[in-house]
Amino acid sequence: MQPGEEAPALLDRLAALEAGVTYRAPPPDGQPPFRHQPGHLPLLLSAPHGAAHRRDGRYKQEDEYTSAFARLLAERTGAHALYACACSDSDPNWDRDTPYKAALRQLAAAHDLRFILDLHGMSDRHRFGLAVGTMCGASCPGRHEALIVATLTAAGFTQATAHQAREYPALRWDRFVVNHSRFTGGLTSHTVTRFAAEELGIHAAQFELCASLRIVGRADPAGIVQTVAAFETLIAQLGARG
């Protein structure tokens, strides 16, 4: 974050970026339902569920503002972004073989990617703000998981257990849980995080943001500012470490 930067400008930029996503409309003929935003760091922010998508024959709702978050963080840090921009006939994250993952494979080779941060959205009903999934350490080295925890903590978030989160009487958006049983990053499904780690040999982690940390108009502006600052620091440190 820039010193003195105000939340309204940040929220306006997120809203402007999200305006380019057509949640339930298909892309123009011949175009994929996702786009690549080039960067110069060997890191990529992924948002495969930024628009509606089909899973097992049924359409699933978009993770609002995850595409905007990926784009915003990419333009502020120099990382690459791959994000959903229109409705997809497949699930870019869940299905084993998808055009989205094929594009990710090409980008990984072309830009020598070293780390992928895969962004998703979760409901406020889980009562905590951020879920970090590293497949219980299988998708990235322990030093990276420790760096994620340390960076979130330094940014004002507090680590909690899943049991502690269940006991909260209301949402605590400043709490995060690592490898929650619902948000492991891909122990039982063919996620982008799992694809990156197992098929591309790239370290990766999945980040689930609650609605109150990402959706402009519903989110706490202070929470969005804090989240953006945390990810900016994390991306800078991951880029420095490789």
Image (cartoon, rainbow, N blue to C red):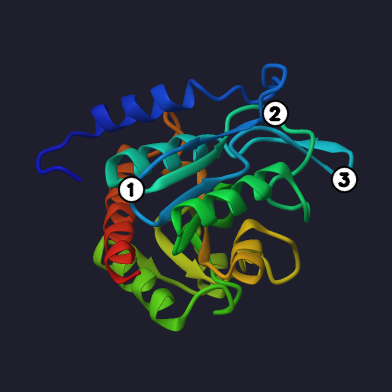
Q: Which percent across, then down, holds residue 2?
A: 15, 42
Q: Tally the marks.
A: 3
Of labels 3 and 2, earlier in sequence is: 3
Residue visible at 78% across and 40% down? 90
Place residue 92 in its image quadrant: top right
Q: Which percent across, then down, holds residue 226?
A: 29, 50
Task: Say if mark 3 contacts mark 2, CB within 8 Å.
Answer: no
Disc 2 residue type (three-letter): Cys
Q: What is the C-alpha distance between the residues marked 3 and 2?
A: 15 Å
In the image: residue 29, left or right of residue 46: right
Residue visible at 39% across and 81% down? 143
Residue visible at 73% across and 33% down? 88
Task: Say if mark 1 contacts mark 3, CB within 8 Å.
Answer: no
Of labels 1 and 3, earlier in sequence is: 1
| Residue linked to disc 1 | 40
| Residue linked to disc 2 | 87
Quadrant housing the C terminus: bottom left
Any part of residue 219 in sight: yes
Q: Which percent across, then down, holds residue 18?
A: 47, 27
Q: What is the C-alpha distance between the residues marked 1 and 3?
A: 36 Å
Disc 1 residue type (three-letter): His
Residue lying at the far bottom of the rendered structure: 142
Residue nearest the observer in this picture, 113 or 62: 113
| Residue linked to disc 3 | 56
